[in-house]
Amino acid sequence: MLTKRIIPCLDVKEGRVVKGIHFEDLRDAGDPVELGLQYNNQGADELVFLDITASAQKRKTTKELARRVAQRIFIPFTIGGGIKSTEDIKVILENGADKVALNTHAVLNPEMIKKAAEIFGSQCIVVAMDVKKIKGSWKVFIYGGKQETELDAWEWSQRIVRYGAGEILLTSMDRDGTNQGFDLEITRKISSSVPIPVIASGGGGELVHFKQALQEGEADAVLAASVFHYGKFSIKELKDFLAEYNIEVRR
């Protein structure tokens, strides 16, 4: 059995970590590298840094973040936000990131996923899906959750696999920042139907929520932000809790 991963997420805006609810009402949570170092020392398996307001003008900022993180943190980390081309991916990987997360531009240009996987290897390519339930079905959103698309989340997940991505980061916008638990229905629907790992994101607020995402939701990893940023519980406490239920985690 593969071990399940615990992944803190650091949403970065203008060089600072922020956290909100439903992708809005953001508040400051600290310096990304310093927070990342804390999670490194606490036993996190990986880290995800997402530049939530990235644009072409801020590409230098993302490159600099990758370099700063790589100098001080020694667990795998992913960087995403505003990545538009394989050249962008190359720059971020060359500056120390282990993986990149693609979202908006993967939707706008799906061939980019295939090209990136061929050049850098599937293991480097994570496709992030921001999804919201609309009239009974889950729709994919882009541009940091600001724009709804016609894409059905499950159908998009199948295409992501065919294009060669190595992992899916699935975020429920409905649950984001609520601490009310992961959306188990869409997590299970996608996790059970794709051959690549799925990271569940959005809504983790209690220890039991993470157990549910990994068992009932069949996720391969769980990602959270506010519970770690504001000290509700530590990564060690979460791993100890999961181990009590015979969920294999890295110790």
Image (cartoon, helix red, strand yellow):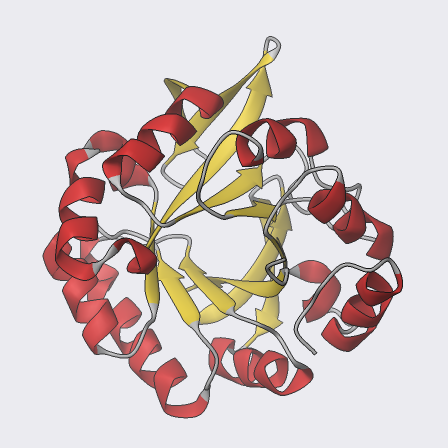
- x and y percent of residue 198 in the render? 52, 45
Please name the residue shown 74% across and 62% down the image.
Answer: 227
Towards the viewer: 60 or 137 = 137
The residue at the far top in this view is 135
Q: Is residue 89 left or right of residue 79?
A: left
Please name the residue shown 58% across and 79% down the image.
Answer: 35
Q: Is residue 172 left or right of residue 203?
A: left
- x and y percent of residue 72 in the render? 43, 91
Q: Quadrant of residue 143?
A: top left
User: Considering the image in quadrants, where does the C terminus appear?
Assistant: bottom right
Asked if one can make out residue 196 in the rendered structure from this viewpoint, the answer is yes
- x and y percent of residue 159 in the render? 32, 28
Towards the viewer: 239 or 145 = 239
Q: Using the image, determine if residue 141 lies above or below residue 85.
A: above
Q: Using the image, determine if residue 31 lies above or below residue 170.
A: below
Q: Quadrant of residue 29?
A: bottom right
Asked if one can make out residue 232 in the rendered structure from this viewpoint, the answer is no
Q: Is residue 222 left or right of residue 67?
A: right
User: Considering the image in quadrants, where does the N terminus appear?
Assistant: bottom right
- x and y percent of residue 169 in the render? 48, 46
Please name the residue shown 37% across and 52% down the image.
Answer: 53
